[in-house]
Amino acid sequence: MAIASRRRARGKRRLKAEINVVPYIDVMLVLLIIFMVTAPLLNVGVDVNLPQADAKSLEQNKKQPVVVQVGKDGALHLVHEGVDRPQPVDAQQLVVKVRAFVAADPNVPVYVAGDRDVSYQTVYSVLSLLQREAKVPRAGLMGAPVQGSGK
């Protein structure tokens, strides 16, 4: 009987030679869920509404827009309803006039038409001036359609 009890004791103490992978699978699934939740939050960007090359014009707004033209040399001109040709203005006059248009109608469309050869910094400065000083909620960039497209 003593021999049988020794065999049972050895059998109980025998080590298993397998790896328990259940905790590793649990950790992997938790990490997968964390990455799936945080991945959409990592899309950090700036919303920029730039004109498309072959886009058709949208007829969503029946109001006449206020257009700020930035010339090749950085000179500013203002075009609005009731004016046949662009009015030359400086930055302070531009702010005062556009602020008056926005105060009269907050939904009036305001566009910046920059010359092809003017620096991007100049156009960006005009956009920020309109939003910061003239309190324009949304200002867009104007573009011309591609010449010679067969569409």
Image (tube, rainbow, N blue to C red):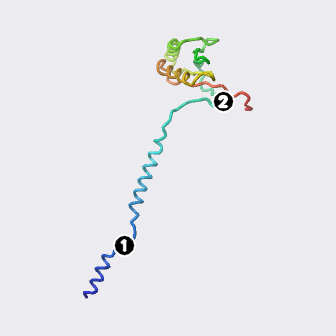
* Label 1, residues with CA under 10 Å away: few <14, some 14-19, many ≥20: few
Q: Is residue 79 above or below residue 121?
A: above
Report x, y in % for residue 104. 51, 15
Which is more toward the observer, 100 or 94? 94
User: On screen, 10 above or below 70?
Assistant: below
Amino acid type of the residue tagged 2 in the rendering: Lys
Placement of the N terminus among the 4 image quadrants: bottom left
Q: Is residue 5 left or right of residue 104?
A: left
2 or 1: tag closer to the N-terminus: 1
Residue 109 at x, y percent in the picture: 56, 22
Residue 52 left/right relative to 4: right
Q: Which residue is mark 1?
A: 16
Q: Residues within 10 Å of mark 2 (few under 14, many from 20)?
A: few
User: Which part of the image, by quadrant, shows the C terminus?
Assistant: top right
Quadrant position of residue 11: bottom left
Q: Nearer the viewer, mark 2 or mark 1?
A: 1
Q: Secondary structure at mark 2?
A: loop
Measured as percent of width and height from the top left, residue 91 is found at 52, 14
Q: How many angstroms separate mark 2 from mark 1 (CA)?
A: 72 Å
Q: Amino acid at mark 1?
A: Lys
Q: Residue at x 52, y 32 (%)?
A: 47
Instruction: Find residue 68 and report its horizontal and vertical position in percent.
Output: 58, 18
Q: In this view, which residue lies farthest toward the bottom?
A: 1
Q: Circle 2 is placed at which residue position?
A: 56
Compared across the picture, whether 131 is left or right of 8 comes to right
